[in-house]
Image: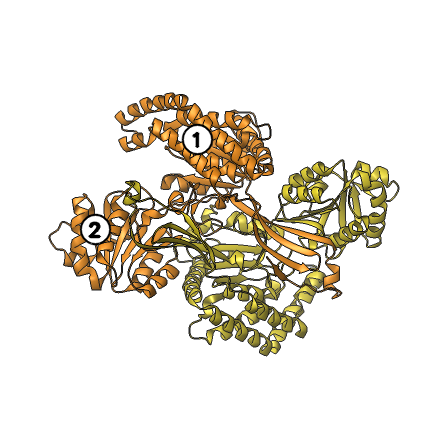
Chain colours: A orange, B yellow
């Protein structure tokens, strides 16, 4: 959890430029902490009312958003011409009127979700008149660092507010004007409510600010990086604050001996081709040797039509000679292509498939295609991943598709939140103990005994 | 999450002594990973059967444990004589026959708890024939580093096995022989079951091993340090693995204007005096100015009888002149005394008390004494701590007292587990998605729509 000492020095307070910047991020984080306490005090009704007002403000601010986005896109075209960003990145940057309507709709969807706060997670009578209640509550201040895709702003803002947290966001520099317009509209809208501080959302401006943010462990409770492998690694290496994110998405589809091959073809194709640039697309196809001879020609023909490059194990090559399949190396099993490339391995059995996934995968999402309930149960129990699917594409691993309304990010870690993080991932819990004067001395002496009776 | 580069080098594989040691810890961690997968596959009945056998083995091994402990205690007496450990530490080291019976009883208690695995935490129909189930599962491999108190071993071993995890433990060097005997007895007992690998518990021997353990992020999922502030800080600074623990226990008792003063005296006294060396004892007493004049003389007289040193704010000193109360400094509000010392501050109102606790506390456990339900609700909601108590001593913050059977440790962090960590803190969850061939392309094209219907 340590970070470069140069940054620690910058935080200590001497009078030069980086200090100025870090002091301002520190004070932003402090204001976010104060704002988080105010937001946490709001009733569920008040939070939903503010969300509906923010959704309306987004619709009313459409022209401002479109103007800002036009500036970003013009600059983006220059960046594409200069070869600094790809045209795919430019496409993701563009916001349309329909996109703005969609943003407002998502905010209203989040407002309509059940309140994640104050949920009684358990209750136990420890003794007569001594009741322990475990209750959900907000995390506090959450920092999210993302790249491109300005529509992430209303998603984060709405999930944050709904769960009683303050958020600090930093978007990609290509989308700076759009992001700024969205945050400004949100702050104006929520700031009109006397109990709701505008600082419940704060926008960071520069890359240097990110490094400063990562040091605010007193006032920031969680950092979520959303973006490239490099971004996530950078954040994890430099943060003193707990980080949830996914470094990689090496997802697998395993075609079992008892697979329905029609489903197998459809799922493998969707998992690879439907959107290859994202983390929940598949990188490796594992095929039981009992069905490889029948299945491989079908899927490979279909994948090649879609322009997918295939890298196969020796058995794959032997089954499909002279088809331009490249021999896969050890490195292929560890590679997130994020492109129209797929590695294929023929395995002897279910155990080998599970072993391969647990060894080479990234614990993100892995699917088995099988009609054998026992094989599915074994796969779903023993594959050590956030998402384990039977007869469905890995592409379903997503907060919206899971029914969370939106997502803050996806976590490959096992602690706190695993998989797509929605409102629940933005909460923690506290233990409330309601007594009537009890002291521990009486239980240590044996004068009193615990009952430990579960309550509803 | 980075660690000293010297250690990284030591891990990379050249042939000298530290490499040897780190290689062996790495291979221990790998074996623990393999063992964790075997333990995770056991049914609840199998895990409980093994626990009952282990409890019996502890009873049968009593003489071996006592002999080992006698060696530790003889060495400990020399350490006390040499001024290296305190006699209180020696006392905590000593194991009696009654203590061994108690260890076995705790293991049986853990066996009798409900199974924490395979719990359906939520279920949603995403669409017809596409069901998402969120289900609890083991974390994997958990490392626990503790000081003295060898009775921690069967607690950790039983909580670990019950929750389907493998554990790697490192005890204090003063208790080396006792710890080794306990781990050996446990490994023998569980190893008699063909499906249960002895490596489901591993004992680390040296301090150097700890540093090596903290680098095994591929095979260890969580580290829990239990012990001094220095130990916890050392682990947090040097770990690449997520760490849950409590750096400090600066707990408060706040006596509200509407307090029953009899309860206030009893709770304040218990929270400070009953066991001052532990993290859930109180360090600061906050007193509403409306009751200070009546309450302070009572509690101070009682505390002074017990030999408690008092450090008071200006108002406390003014109310109780000439009583040998030391003037508290800013530093006192931030200090965990872990001794018979208490700081006292008179506050103007509830808000000031909450502000003081959130500013100076360690987010461990804080109590309000009041008969005013509204004041209590505000305190319990707004104090940002793992435990927030009304009319009960802070000393109740403990896994056994909370009904968890035992505890792995106590977390002051907000992520994953907060407060005393029992079986639930040793689990995570995965999303199981049961489909019938669904692909994402159909939902993106609009051919199909999600239903997102909550299921039981």
Residue denoted by label 1 = A207
User: What x and y, as percent, mark residue B92?
Assistant: 68, 64
Image position, residue A322 (x, y; %): 11, 52
Element type at marker 1? helix
Query: Percent x, y for residue B257?
Result: 78, 41
Marks 2 and 1, the one that precedes in the sequence:
1
Residue extending farthest to the left is A322
Query: Does residue B273 appear in this view?
Result: yes
Check whether the beta carbons of the residues at disc 2 and disc 1 lie within 8 A of each other. no
Q: Nearer the viewer, mark 2 or mark 1?
A: 2
Marking on residue A177: none
The answer to which of A322 and B349 lies nearer the viewer is B349
Taking the image as drawn, is residue A95 in sight? no
Number of labelled discs?
2
> Which quadrant of the rendered structure holds the C terminus of chain A?
bottom right
Q: Position of residue A327 (x, y in %)?
A: 19, 53
Q: Nearer the viewer, residue B233 or A385?
A: A385
Decide: few, some or many residues near mark 1? Use Cα within 10 Å; few <14, some 14-19, many ≥20: few
Q: Which residue is mark 2?
A: A311
Spatial CA distance of label 2 from label 1 is 38 Å
In the image, what residue occupies the spot 38% across and 46% down?
A: B451
On what subunit does the disc labeled 1 rest?
A
Q: Is residue A29 left or right of residue B29?
A: right
């Amino acid at each position: 959890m340590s970070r470069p000492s140069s940054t620690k020095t910058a935080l200590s307070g001497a009078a030069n430029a980086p200090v100025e910047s870090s002091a301002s991020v520190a004070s932003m984080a402090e204001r976010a902490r104060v704002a988080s306490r105010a937001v946490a005090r709001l009733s569920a009704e008040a939070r939903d009312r503010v969300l509906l007002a923010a959704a309306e403000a987004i619709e009313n601010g459409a022209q401002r958003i479109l103007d800002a986005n036009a500036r970003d896109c013009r600059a983006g075209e220059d960046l594409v011409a200069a070869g600094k960003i790809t045209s795919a990145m430019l496409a993701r940057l563009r916001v349309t009127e329909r996109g703005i309507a969609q943003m407002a709709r998502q905010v209203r969807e989040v407002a309509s979700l059940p309140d994640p706060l104050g949920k009684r997670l358990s209750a136990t009578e420890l003794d007569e008149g001594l009741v322990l209640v475990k209750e959900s509550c907000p995390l506090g201040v959450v920092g999210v660092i993302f790249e491109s895709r300005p529509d992430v702003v209303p998603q984060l803002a709405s999930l944050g507010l709904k769960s009683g947290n303050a958020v600090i966001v930093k978007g990609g520099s290509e989308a700076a004007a759009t992001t700024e317009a969205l945050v400004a509209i949100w702050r104006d809208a929520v700031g009109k409510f006397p109990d709701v501080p505008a600082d419940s959302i704060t926008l960071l401006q520069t890359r240097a600010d990110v490094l400063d943010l990562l040091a605010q462990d007193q006032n920031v409770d969680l950092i979520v990086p959303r973006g490239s492998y490099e971004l996530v690694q950078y954040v994890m290496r430099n943060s003193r604050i707990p980080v949830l994110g996914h470094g990689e998405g090496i997802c697998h589809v395993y075609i079992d001996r008892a697979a329905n091959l029609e489903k197998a073809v459809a799922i493998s194709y969707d998992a690879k081709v439907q959107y290859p640039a994202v983390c929940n697309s598949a990188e490796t196809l594992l095929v039981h040797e009992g069905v490889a001879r029948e299945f491989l020609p079908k899927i490979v023909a279909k994948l090649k039509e879609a322009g997918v490059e295939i890298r196969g194990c020796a058995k794959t090559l032997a089954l499909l000679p002279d088809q331009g399949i490249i021999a896969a190396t050890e490195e292929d099993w560890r590679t997130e292509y994020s492109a129209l490339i797929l590695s294929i391995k023929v395995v002897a059995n279910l155990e080998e498939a599970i072993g391969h996934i647990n060894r080479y995968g990234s614990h993100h999402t892995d699917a088995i295609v099988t009609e054998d309930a026992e094989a599915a149960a074994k796969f779903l129990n023993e594959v050590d991943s956030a998402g384990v699917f039977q007869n469905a594409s890995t592409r379903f691993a997503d907060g919206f598709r899971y029914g969370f309304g939106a997502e803050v990010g996806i976590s490959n870690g096992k602690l706190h939140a695993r998989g797509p993080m929605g409102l629940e991932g933005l909460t923690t819990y506290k233990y409330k103990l309601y007594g009537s004067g009890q002291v521990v001395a009486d239980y240590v002496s044996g004068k009193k005994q615990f009952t430990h009776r579960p309550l509803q």
